[in-house]
Image: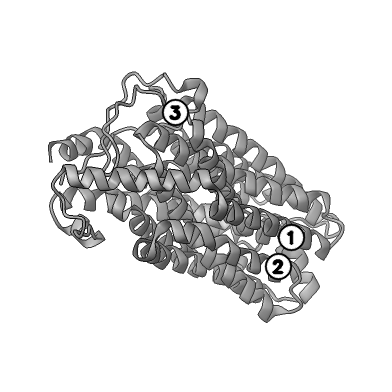
Amino acid sequence: MVWTTSSTWAFDEDSIADQSQGRVPGQQTGKESIRMSESTKLGKYKGLQIASGLGGILGSGCIVGLSATITVIKDYLGLSPVQVGVVSSVMTFCIGFGSLFGGRIADAIGRVRVYNYVNFIYAIGTLIMAFTPNYPSLLVAAAILGLTSGTELPVSLSIMSTDAPNEGISNKLVSSHQIYWHFGQFISYLVTFFLSTTGIVSARVVFVFLTVIALISALWRTFSKSLAEIHAEAAARELASAKAEGESETVKVSVSSVLFGKNSKVFLFSFIGIGVYYVAWNLLANTWGQFQTYLLAVNIPDEAHRQTFATGIGLVLLTVATIMSAVFTGISASHLRKPLFFLGGAMQVVAMAVMAIGIGMGNGSLWFIVAGLALFNIFNSFAGEAMYKLWTQNAFPSQVRASIQGFLNGFSRICCALFAIVTPTLVAPENIGVTAWGFFGIILVSFLAGVVMINTEKSRSAVLTEN
C-alpha cells in the first residue's frame, strides 16, 4: 500500500482554481491520482460543501452562543463564577469526548450514518439550552451540545475529504469549512448584540436559531439523493483503488498500524507536531471563544452597558476575523501562503505581548485587552484552525483521518475543559495581568511548533512519496 500526501494545502475558491502552478501533486488513497492543475470547480459538490458547512455553524455557534450569553444566563439562574466555569468546562470536555470517541464510532459503524444523524441529537441540546429552567438542565444541554458538536467536526471533514474526487476539490471543501465556522460565531454575536438589553430572551433566540440550523442540516444530509450519490461514488472509488493495488477488501487500516507501522516516523512526526501546534493554539482560541464576552464584561466598570459593549466588541472582532479568513482563502494557494503563516503566527505572539504589557502598565487595561484580541482575531486566519484542518486531512490515510483528527480534537478539548474551570478566576481584573503572560507563552509554543511543521512540508512529502 502506498500512502502519499501533498506538501501544500490550498484554500482556493473558484476564482483562483486554476492558479495551481508550483503546487506539489498529491495522491490519496481511495481517490484517483489527479494532478492539482486539473479543474477544482465544485459543481455538484457545492451541496456537500453547504451541508457540511452548516455543521461548522453549529460547532462554533454553540461555543460562542454560550460565551455571548453566559452573562445573562448567569444573572437569570443566579450562577456563581465557579458554576459559570463548570458549565463551560462541561461543554468543552464533552466536545473532547465526542471528538475522541465519535471518530472511532463513525469509522466502526459508518461515517455517513453518523454524519446524517448526529445533528438531530444536537437539536435536542439546543432546545434544552434555550429554555433551561435551572442549573442541572443547563449542564445537560452543555453536555449534549459538546458530545454532538465534538463528533460532528472530524466526521464532516473526513466525509468531505473522502467524497471529493480529487485533491483540489478536497482542499477547497475542507478549507471552506472555516468560513462557515466563523459565520456561526458571527451570527451568535450579532443576535446577542442586538438583543443585549432583553436579558434571557437573547439566549433563547440564539439557541432556537441553532435548533433550526441543526434540523435543516440533519434533514438535508439524511434525505438528499445527490449527497447519497456522492457518498456512493466515493465508496466505489475506494473499493476500486483497493482492488487495483491488490488489497483485500477485508484488510483494515488502523491508527496503530499507521502511527507504528511502515513510515511510522513520518506519521508520528506529523501527529506530534500537529498536536503540539493545535493544542497550544486552541487553549487560547477556546478561551476567547468561551470567555471573550465574560473577560470584557468583568473588566468594564459600567454595569448598565457592559453586556452591550462586550458583545459589540465581539461582533466587530468576529467580522474582521471572517473577512480575513475569506481573504486568506483567496490567496493562500499562491506563494504567499508560507510567509502569511509566519506573519500570522508572529502577530498572534505580538497580540499577547501587547495585552500583557498594557495590562502591566495599569491604566486603560481594557483597551489593551481589546487591542490584543483584535490582533489575535485578525491574524489567526493565517496561522490557526484552518491550517490545522488541512494538515490533518492531508497527512494521514483516509481510513483513519476521522479517528486521528478526532483524537487530536478530543485531547485538545479536554485540555481546554480543564483550563476552563479556572478561566473565570484567571481573567478577573486582579489576575489578568499574570494570566496574559501565560497566554503569551502558550501562543509562542504553538507558533514554534507550526514553524517546524511548515518548514518540513517538502521533506516529509518526499519521504511519503518515495514510500
Q: CA distance from mark 3 to mark 1?
A: 36 Å
Q: Is residue 91 above or below residue 211?
A: below
306 and 211: which one is in front? 211
The residue identified by callout 3 is: 332
- Asked if residue 39 shows in the view, the reply is yes
- Please report the residue visible at 70 percent of the width from the left and 56 percent of the height from the top: 212
Q: CA distance from mark 2 to mark 1?
A: 6 Å
Expressed as whole percent of the image width and height from the top left, the position of residue 123 reads: 64, 64
How many marks can you see? Answer: 3
Estimate how packed mark 3 is, as few (under 14), some (14 to 19) or many (20 or more) residues with alpha carbons within 10 Å: many
In the image: residue 357, left or right of residue 212: left
The residue identified by callout 2 is: 127
Which callout, 3 or 1, points to the residue nearer the camera? 1
- Please report the residue visible at 63 percent of the width from the left and 75 percent of the height from the top: 139
Q: CA distance from mark 3 to mark 2?
A: 39 Å
118 and 395: which one is in front? 118
The residue identified by callout 1 is: 208
Expressed as whole percent of the image width and height from the top left, the position of residue 116 reads: 51, 57
Dot 2 and dot 1 residues touching (CB under 8 Å): yes
